[in-house]
Every structure is written in structure tokens, then in C-alpha cells.
Image (cartoon, rainbow, N blue to C red):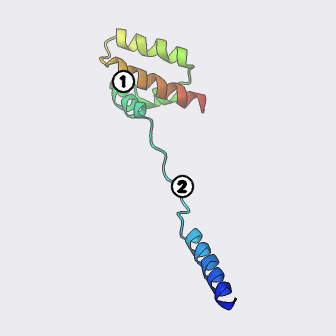
Amino acid sequence: MKKRFVFIFVLIALAVVLVGCGSSTPAEPTPHPGQALVETKCSTCHGLPQVNNAKYTRGTWESTVDRMVMAGMQIPDDQKALIIDYLAIRDENK
């Protein structure tokens, strides 16, 4: 009986120690892949504050990025979609 009590006590103490060893700082979220594209593609013609201060709906971002492509921004469709997705999600959370 005494051995069982000691064993249970050691297990509980070990669990408490292991829980205390966990990281107290949360991991940094992975940035959206469109963020880097906005910083490189959009900043060739616009200052980042101009882009970062804008707050549009997804539809407005689609129209805006389409206008930028018509004005000469060269970007593949998959990267264009990532830019629109990043900006739309970002602005939903503003």
C-alpha cells in the first residue's frame, strides 16, 4: 500500500513539473503568403502606409488589384489571388 502511495505521489509530482516546463509564450503565427507579395509588389508604386491604411472589402480589393494589373503590374494569377486574399482577410480584422 505504501509503495502504491509513493508511486502515485511521484507521478503527480512529475506531471506538475512537466506542466510547469511548458512554454509560456505562444508561438508566432505564420504570416499569410500574400503579405510578402504586398510588401514587394505593391510597394514598387505605392508606399506601404498607403496600402496598409486602406480598408476595403474583398470585392473592392479584387477591382483594385485588377486595375493595378491593367496599369502594368506584372504578376501571375496565383500571386494575384494571394494578394487579394491577404488584403481581404487583413481588412476583415481591422
Count of all numbered marks drawn on residues in the image: 2
Residue under the point 55% across and 71% down:
18
Residue under the point 47% across and 29% down:
86
The residue identified by callout 1 is: 79
x, y (%) of residue 72? 31, 12
Amino acid type shown at disc 2: Pro
Residue 92 is drawn in which quadrant?
Answer: top right
x, y (%) of residue 77? 35, 17
Residue under the point 62% across and 79% down:
13
Q: Is mark 1 on a helix, strand or loop?
A: helix
Q: Is residue 25 left or right of residue 36?
A: right
Task: Tell me how far mark 2 sits from mark 1, CA to CA.
Answer: 29 Å
Q: Residues within 10 Å of mark 1 (few under 14, many from 20)?
A: some
Specify the farthest residue to the top: 70
Quarter containing the C terminus: top right
The residue identified by callout 2 is: 26
Is 10 rendered above or below residue 68?
below
Q: Which of marks 2 and 1 is nearer the N terminus?
A: 2
User: In the image shown, does 90 or 6 lie closer to the viewer?
Assistant: 6
Amino acid type shown at disc 1: Gln
Q: Residues within 10 Å of mark 2 (few under 14, many from 20)?
A: few
Quarter containing the N terminus: bottom right
Specify the farthest residue to the front: 1
Residue under the point 46% across and 22% down:
84
